[in-house]
Amino acid sequence: MKKMITAWMLVLTLLVPIHAFAHTGMEEADPSEGSVVTESIYEVTVTFTTPISEGSTVALTAADGTELALQDVVIDENTMMVKTVEPLPNGTINVDWKIVGEDGHPIEEGYSFEVDAPIEEAPSSDEEGQAEESVDTEDAPESESESATESASDEAVDDSNQLRNSLLIAGIAALILIVGVVVFFVRKPKRNE
């Protein structure tokens, strides 16, 4: 019985660290978590502890719950750079992401920071009319890129699920193999000398 307990303790000791260090997390961000930004900014950068998949997504929301329009999201290995269409509004900005880390696990996390930038003067009515016209012409291509991004995101989630299922099957097979080896050595008949 002592051998069986020792064998199980060994198996558990080997499996727990693998699971504990498998997930990707945020390493750093600019602006950093909890910081107060005192200038107009259009960009947020998040760096993760491991590379992330191209299908990873991010959303920026203002204090009132309004999701901010994104111009571009660039993923380069373990860095996600987000550019907004307009400068970030004053107040709390929540940065929420859905990423697929190096280990294949989908992760949803986020952080927040404050913006306290000087308010810019509103354009005159003539400038507003011109600005609205240019925004209207830009909306159509943006919609196409949004649907392409959603499609790519769905494909990445499917790939992530396939990878996760493969890893789960491999883990179960390895566990069965380890248990089989332990049982073989523990139940080995003693020799009479």
Image: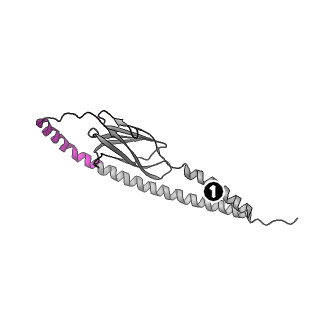
Asked if residue 183 shows in the view, the reply is yes
Residue at label 1? 12
Three-letter code, disc 1: Leu
Instruction: State the image quarter where residue 130 is shown.
Output: top left
- Most foreground residue, 124 or 186: 124
Work out which residue is located at the far right of the displayed protein and give it: 193
Q: State left or right for residue 93 relative to residue 28.
A: left
Horizontal side of 127 relative to 41 (left or right) equals left
Image coordinates of residue 32 in percent, x first then y, are: 40, 38
Label 1 environment density (alpha carbons within 10 Å; few <14, some 14–19, many ≥20): few
Question: Does the magenta portion include 185?
Answer: no
On the rendered structure, is 178 left or right of 56? Answer: right
Between residue 78 and residue 93, name the one nearer to us. Answer: 93
Q: Quadrant of residue 174?
A: bottom right
Residue 86: x, y in percent?
26, 39
Q: Name the residue located 34 percent from the left edge and 40 percent from the top edge.
A: 114
Drawn side of residue 28 relative to residue 174, left or right: left
155, 56: nearer the viewer: 56
Q: Residue at x 61, y 60 (%)?
A: 175
Q: Residue 14, image x and y in percent?
A: 63, 53
Secondary structure predominantly adopted by residues drawn in magenta: helix
Quarter of the image that includes the N terminus? bottom right
The colour scheme used here is: one colour
Q: Which residues are magenta?
A: 116-145
Residue 13 screen position, x and y as percent: 64, 54
| Picture residue at 38% right of the left edge, 37% below the top | 35
Q: Quadrant of the C terminus?
A: bottom right
Would residue 185 be seen by someone viewing this image from the given angle?
Answer: no
Residue 190 placement: quadrant: bottom right
Q: Disc 1 on helix, strand or loop?
A: helix
